[in-house]
Image: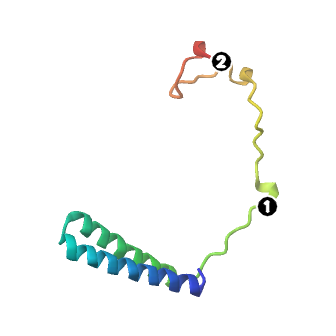
């Protein structure tokens, strides 16, 4: 993440903390408010971890690595005699 993205993330997490604080004033320590507070805290921890570690460079996918899947229907004879147990349906229903 860039510095500006990290700053925006931290600002947004701070805003979420304020919102959850307002909810706590309204609803008290309801279970849902506690879960929200825990979630926001977890976001802060994860954002800090990201900020402390250098970003990995994404490996660009080359055209040679892609596998084209044809959109035409498969030839049903390819599956003739294959066991379809666990997949659902019965061969006589096709």
Q: Secondary structure at mark 2?
A: loop
Q: Position of residue 14 (x, y in %)?
A: 39, 83
Q: Is residue 71 above or below residue 76?
A: below
Res. 53 in view: no
Quarter of the image for residue 90 reads top right
As rendered, which of 31 and 53 lies closer to the eye? Answer: 31
Quarter of the image for residue 27 reads bottom left
**Reading the chain from its start, which is encountered first: label 2 or label 1?**
1
* Residue at 70% from the left image edge and 68% from the top image edge: 59
Q: Position of residue 21 (x, y in %)?
A: 27, 78
Q: Secondary structure at mark 1?
A: loop
Q: Which mark is residue 81?
A: 2
Res. 91 in view: yes
* Residue at 78% from the left image edge and 39% from the top image edge: 70
- Compared across the picture, whether 80 is left or right of 47 comes to right
Which residue is under mark 1?
Answer: 62
As rendered, which of 7 and 85 lies closer to the eye? Answer: 7
- Compared across the picture, whether 10 is left or right of 72 comes to left
- Compared across the picture, whether 87 is left or right of 22 comes to right
Q: Position of residue 52 (x, y in %)?
A: 50, 85
As rendered, which of 48 and 6 lies closer to the eye? Answer: 6
**Placement of the N terminus among the 4 image quadrants:** bottom right
* Residue at 76% from the left image edge and 37% from the top image edge: 71
**Placement of the C terminus among the 4 image quadrants:** top right
- Residue reaching furthest front? 26
Q: How is the image coloured?
A: rainbow
- Compared across the picture, whether 31 is left or right of 81 comes to left
């Amino acid at each position: 993440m860039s510095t500006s993205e990290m700053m925006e993330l931290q600002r947004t997490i701070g805003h979420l903390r304020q919102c959850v604080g307002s909810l706590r004033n309204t609803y008290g320590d309801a279970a849902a408010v506690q879960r929200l507070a825990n979630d926001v805290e977890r976001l802060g921890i994860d954002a800090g971890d990201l900020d402390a570690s250098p970003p990995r460079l994404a490996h660009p996918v080359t055209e040679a690595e892609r596998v084209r899947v044809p959109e035409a229907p498969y030839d049903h004879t390819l599956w003739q005699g294959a066991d379809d147990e666990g997949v659902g349906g019965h061969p006589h229903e096709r």
